Image (cartoon, rainbow, N blue to C red):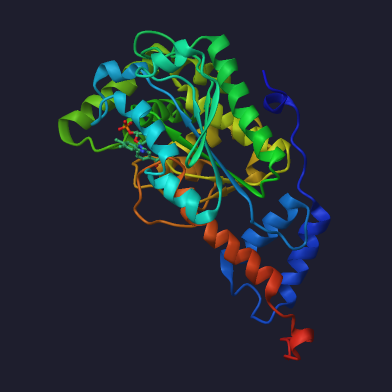
Amino acid sequence: MPTCWTDPLPPLDENTRRLASERQQQLTKPPGSLGRLEQAAIQLSGQQGRVNPVIAQVAISVFAADHGVCEEDISAFPQTVTAQMIDNFVQGGAAISVMAQQLNAVLEVINLGTVADLAAQRSGQKSTDQAHGHIHHEIIAPTTANFTQGPAMTETQLIQALQSGDRAAARAAEMKADLFIAGEMGIGNTTSAAAVAAAVLQQPAAPLVGAGTGLMGAALQHKISVVERGLTRHAQARTPLSILAALGGFEIAAIASAYLGAASRRIPVLVDGFIATVAALIAVRQQPELLHWLHFGHRSQEQGHQQVLTALNAHPLLDLEMRLGEGSGAAIAVSLLQSACALHNGMATFAEAHVDDGQ
Ligand SMILES: Cc1cc2ncn([C@H]3O[C@H](COP(=O)(O)O)[C@@H](O)[C@H]3O)c2cc1C
Ligand SMILES: O=C(O)c1cccnc1
């Protein structure tokens, strides 16, 4: 078990947070007029321990894994896409690859096990640099098990996934990242994420189950019934760890742990869409203090995202009607956090600009 899972998280730096808050009051604008951008800059100040927060270096870790529940026919796409997209990420062709390039971010993909990459598994390939990112092969198993038949993963597999997430956070700290983004790739993972969210929130499945890659009508009803079967089978799972083992995916577990690992290293986190937010929900249930370290990038179109955001009292920066995952919605929101920092750091105070304040 990585220590971030259980060790208390560091508090925000209340001193820099207070100084940043005071600075916002002195800038040449009516107090509060930059709205949530002010709050974002102040929160970043407390997180980074700097009165003038910066987001120069962004670390993006995309966790990829396959899902046994795909046997139940719950995605519009075949499972082979997961492994194919791993290549696409590091060849520069995926949405998150393009965003990483635009942001000059470091992109890495962590392959936790896909049905189509047994060759890589057999060759013992570990870590390679590709044109547009690094691949870490940290294969746990070719796929999780079908959660309608039994637990998705063993306890050992769960711990491996948590450790993988923590290692990604350690690499982000090593490169002195100012912000951490986790993305995910795993055909079938909106089914797993909906089941995890329903189990954590003790809510019915239907409102948390969405189209994912594009299911509608009878296919969507079937997906709801698959999640309901999983919830019935694993009704005894109540703790974050037992819910992850019963219904989760390797990538969802890894992201939950990566968020805790980032916060434990004082790196602010920008959360992506539905799946990433469900991972955040699990991690916050494990350690409520994590919430202070999280920014929320966007509201996904995926049915259920708003419910999970509400459970976290989270207000995402954007709603662009995106429903992609990969970390893409968070990546789009980076520029807003950068603007929040630029305004906070660069604007003149009333005194500096000889502008009369409102006192
Ligand atoms: C080409 C392609 C690229 C993607 N990138 C992210 N996802 C997204 O879709 C999947 C979840 O949807 P479902 O649960 O319906 O399978 C995840 O892999 C997610 O990251 C993709 C899906 C596809 C097809
Ligand atoms: O919001 C997401 O994370 C999402 C939505 C649909 C498909 N994949 C991911």
Comparing 42 with 173, the one in front is 173
Comparing 75 with 17, the one in front is 75
Comparing 234 with 43, the one in front is 43
Q: Residue at x 43, y 45 (%)?
A: 96
Above or below, comparing residue 84 to residue 349 in the picture: above
Q: Quadrant of residue 50?
A: bottom right
x and y, in percent, of residue 293 in the image: 66, 45
Q: Quadrant of ligand 1?
A: top left
Res 42 visible: yes
Above or below, comparing residue 303 to residue 348 in the picture: above
Left or right of 297 in this view: 227: left
x and y, in percent, of residue 166 in the image: 64, 28
Q: Residue at x 68, y 55 (%)?
A: 44
Q: Residue at x 77, y 39 (%)?
A: 10
Left or right of 292 in this view: 325: left
Q: Which image quarter holds the N terminus?
A: top right
x and y, in percent, of residue 224 in the image: 28, 27
x and y, in percent, of residue 42 in the image: 69, 60
Q: Quadrant of residue 9?
A: top right
Residue extending furthest toward the right: 15
Q: How many marks?
A: 0
Left or right of 145 in this view: 315: right
Above or below, comparing residue 209 to residue 80 in the picture: below
Res 239 visible: no
Q: Residue at x 78, y 53 (%)?
A: 49
